[in-house]
Image: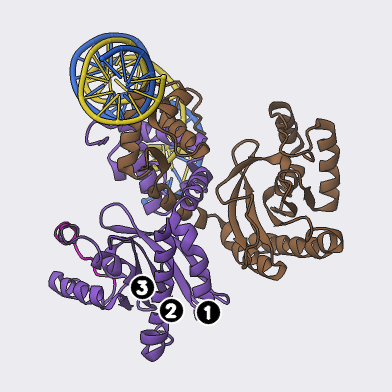
Chain colours: A purple, B brown, C yellow, D blue
Amino acid sequence: MPTADDYGIKATMTSHRILDTIRSRDRPTLTEIARALDLSKPAVHKHLATLETLGYVMRRDGGYEIGLELVSFGVYARRRQRIYEVARPRVVELANTMREQVCLVVPGQGSEWNCLYVFTAVPADVDTPDQEGEIRPLHATAAGKVILANMDKDEVAEFLDHDSLSSETANTITERNELKSKLQAIRDQGVAYDRQEQSDDYRGVAAPVLDDDGRPLGAIEVLGPPPRMSGKRLEEDTVGLVVSGARDVENKLSID
Amino acid sequence: MPTADDYGIKATMTSHRILDTIRSRDRPTLTEIARALDLSKPAVHKHLATLETLGYVMRRDGGYEIGLELVSFGVYARRRQRIYEVARPRVVELANTMREQVCLVVPGQGSEWNCLYVFTAVPADVDTPDQEGEIRPLHATAAGKVILANMDKDEVAEFLDHDSLSSETANTITERNELKSKLQAIRDQGVAYDRQEQSDDYRGVAAPVLDDDGRPLGAIEVLGPPPRMSGKRLEEDTVGLVVSGARDVENKLSID
DNA sequence: GCGAGTCGTTCACTAACCGTTAACAACTTA
DNA sequence: TAAGTTGTTAACGGTTAGTGAACGACTCGC
């Protein structure tokens, strides 16, 4: 298999680093990018010129923004992920019956997850924390934890060793051992909770979507404001719905 | 402004050409890509190795597929387009009241448009022709024509000169002069129809979303099977709804 | 209104690298 | 078995990606 340790195309990797910088900041300027990546301004200039004609970036009032061509690539690629095609109708259905926000999440590179799809029941009285395309660490959300709980033990160990458990709110789990025992409980229960661990304004429940070997393909999470997400509604009604939704997706995926 | 005529980063452009080939074919193999681009296999190999570690491509049973990292870039970038944020709730609403499929389209590079968002009312009895992320020529669909009709005259002229009007069905407009007079009518009417011009299974109506200077920011199109999309329902009910939806989006956009 | 500080851009230059040709193992196919 | 595939390495050479220096345009504070 090809590996791009130092065999790879460096210019492509530089272009990627520039795109990544644009995504993680708010409309950065050329020099801001150059400084962030420790590159010369002319180098960044050339890359941006290229990326602009390709439609990968666009200028917007003085800064750079990810361009429409990548939108096209992205939504095209998403459609080719079977879990997306299968889960999307269920996510919409779930959101409408719960009258809350539901999102579909898949494990990404390393210790991150990608939020593939979000649907919010109208009227949307909430401003969503998990936005489509967002990349977040695994330990601070219900979906992330339920994915983590179903990963291989050594992968989890590597995650625990290499990444620091950043603190998002007062409730975020930042202790290694606490997280470890939680993960065991989550695996037993089959669901994970987010009790204002990533934002004070939210609580959530997530159920995993597993393949035939028990590896996590993704997770479905229901999110809502704390007053609504508590007591029986949270721990019985919501759990039941999200678990049956995830099981449903699992079954459809394992058919072929 | 930067232009990448031959000043640009060639390696980045090569990587893009490879990604583009993957998108326009069905899970192509390494040699298939190399042949299509007239590149040596080792060159393609190096690029694919790099793109794979970046998550831009992934292998799937012997071929290459666009990877999840680009999904992340894409849905992130889409969220940062104001027209998307503003129009999406209206598209969902429109689809639900019409019980049809509705899509949001924006002009892309050159004479193409990108399908940014699609929502289909459940139950979906139809298989959709315009899929999210698809890139299509402007002349063969309602949304494309309504965008074309509102573009600058010289841009349209350039389009007519440079691009051949490909024939998708027996109804596709392939005559330059016929298209020209149609465009004038579309501008006057404010809507464009697709009467089985891109597929025999579909008809559609589209209304443009214009900025304050009358330039097209995008279009909203309602699609449905011919039996349902005809007569009064098509030419009065549907037209009224799609136009008021597009106007609504225009107003929200021009506020700030 | 004058410098000092930005910003983006263009210009040569050169070490590094991208893409080449050639050769290879692992599979299919005839 | 041999002649096709396929993807993969290795070494080489001409191109190029990234450098530093220098430039206009613009925004500051004084």
Q: Which residue was labeled with disc 1? A: A97
Secondary structure state at the residue bearing disc 3: strand
Look at mark 2 in the image and give the residue it sits on: A241
Which span is picked out in magenta? Answer: A158-168
Disc marking residue A206: 3
- Residue D29, position in %: x, y? 38, 52
CA distance separating discs 2 and 1: 9 Å
Label 2 chain ID: A
Q: Residues within 10 Å of mark 1 (few under 14, many from 20)?
A: few
Q: Residue furthest bottom?
A: A232
Q: Is tag 2's residue or tag 1's residue first in the polypeptide sequence?
A: 1
- Residue under mark 3: which chain is it in? A
Q: Secondary structure at mark 2?
A: helix
**CB under 8 Å between discs 2 and 1:** yes
Asked if the residue at tag 3 contacts the one at tag 1, i.e. Cβ–Cβ closer than 8 Å, the answer is no
Figure check: B15 above or below A141: above
Q: In terms of sequence position, does the residue under pointer 3 or pointer 2 come before the other?
A: 3
Q: Position of residue A51 (x, y in %)?
A: 46, 36
Q: Earlier in the sequence, mark 1 or mark 3?
A: 1
Viewer-proximal residue, A17 or B160? B160
Q: Is residue A181 above or below residue A230?
A: above
Chain that bears disc 1:
A
